[in-house]
Image (cartoon, helix red, strand yellow):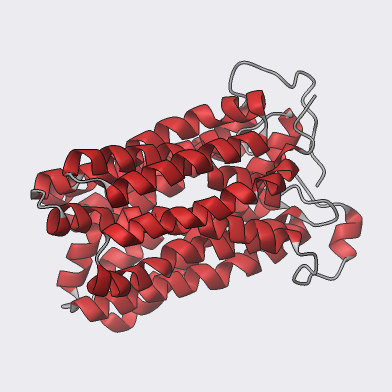
Amino acid sequence: MNTTIVSAPRRRYMSSPRLATSLLFLMNGFIMGSWAPKIPVFAERLRLSEAALGLMILVFGVGSIMAMPFTGVLIARYGATPVVKAVAVAFIPTLLLLTLAGSVALAVPAIFLFGALMAAMDVSMNGNAVAVETAERRAIMSSCHGFWSLGGLAGASIGGFLIAHVGSLGHTLIVTAIASVLLAVAFPKILADAPEESARREKIRLPRSPLPWLIGIMALFSMIPEGAVLDWSAIYLRDELGGTLISAGFGFAAFQLTMTVMRFAGDHVRDRFGAVMTVRFCAAFSIFGLLCAGLAPNLTVVIIGFAITGIGISNLVPVAFSAAGNLPGLQPGIGLSVTTMLGYSGILAAPSLIGFIAEHIGFAPIFTALSLLHVIVFLMAPLARYAERDHRS
């Protein structure tokens, strides 16, 4: 991928391309975080049962998974810049479409489109982040994901307040306006990139090399525990450990807080110790945190365990995405699409299976067992060396 190499690769300030990429992650996370408090309103408006709502969320997941490989093909053909610009513009009004959908027949294509454009933007903005890393010869992926987490926290935090005071439509209009401003600031600063002419003529196919699939598995095993904490930590704390409604939310809050903070620190850690050691460090922390969460005798220790897990999970996926975008002999869009498709399937599909198993054995042994996935990630850490390609001066 052709990029303009920055003459001073170790700049201390945030360059315009890096700012633009960070704002793209912030915008995407903000819209996704804003969707979370709208789900009960969405279900109530359409009179959806829990099963029907589950099917709607499945449609969202199907749209996401289907869009990822298609986006990879577009990036391989045209570069990440035109793709991320187009899908970011298209993504902004999708929350409005969901808010205005007055029937199931309209809501199904709206939520499919929402999932598809969210995923397309995810793949393309990660591709743009890889291009900026290459151009500036330093790691930025972890902080970009930190901006995504920050956007998600902001969207989820103000969502309930705005819905209560200005209504669902008013909330959506405010979110859409904020997202539009973020994109307007980022749009002219997005790093211009284009594939090599030989890549344009090359036939696009699924990679035959095992490397992107192996890194995708590393991302998958990294993200399954993340999805488990996201969807089941509150129920685990309330139903199995006797926590109150307030304390039940502390587990995920602690996890999200430490993960966000460590993502902003992750680039410096990776530049200092290298991608392989960063993955080993993070996997070890996550193993310890998940064991604490699953084996601890009381609520406080479990919450501390989730906080430690957040430190561990924070930089596993960003490093995997950087590695996927820098695989030798493979166009970045294809490697990223494989990794994101496998990785996000862990968040989209695994929590349902976890809930089914938990009905029979409870959540404590599940969180304990999930630590084994990060033992595998620890052993796969040498694959992270591809994240360091072209990043060292």
The answer to whether residue 259 is above or below residue 209 is: above
Q: Is residue 356 visible?
A: yes
Image coordinates for residue 326, horizontal then vertical, percent:
75, 47
Of residues 43 and 268, the one drawn nearer to the viewer in this rendering:
268
Image coordinates for residue 91, horizontal then vertical, percent:
47, 58
Horizontally, is 198 left or right of 20 in the view? Answer: right
- What residue lies at 28% left-to-right and 81% top-to-bottom? 104
Image coordinates for residue 240, horizontal then vertical, percent:
16, 58
Of residues 224 and 13, the one drawn nearer to the viewer in this rendering:
224
The answer to whether residue 94 is above or below residue 33 is: below
- What residue lies at 23% left-to-right and 73% top-to-bottom? 359
Q: Is residue 92 visible?
A: no
Q: Quadrant of residue 231?
A: bottom left
The answer to whether residue 85 is above or below residue 111 is: above
- What residue lies at 81% left-to-right and 52% top-to-bottom? 195
- What residue lies at 80% left-to-right and 24% top-to-bottom? 393
The extreme bottom residue here reads 105
Q: Quadrant of residue 154?
A: top left
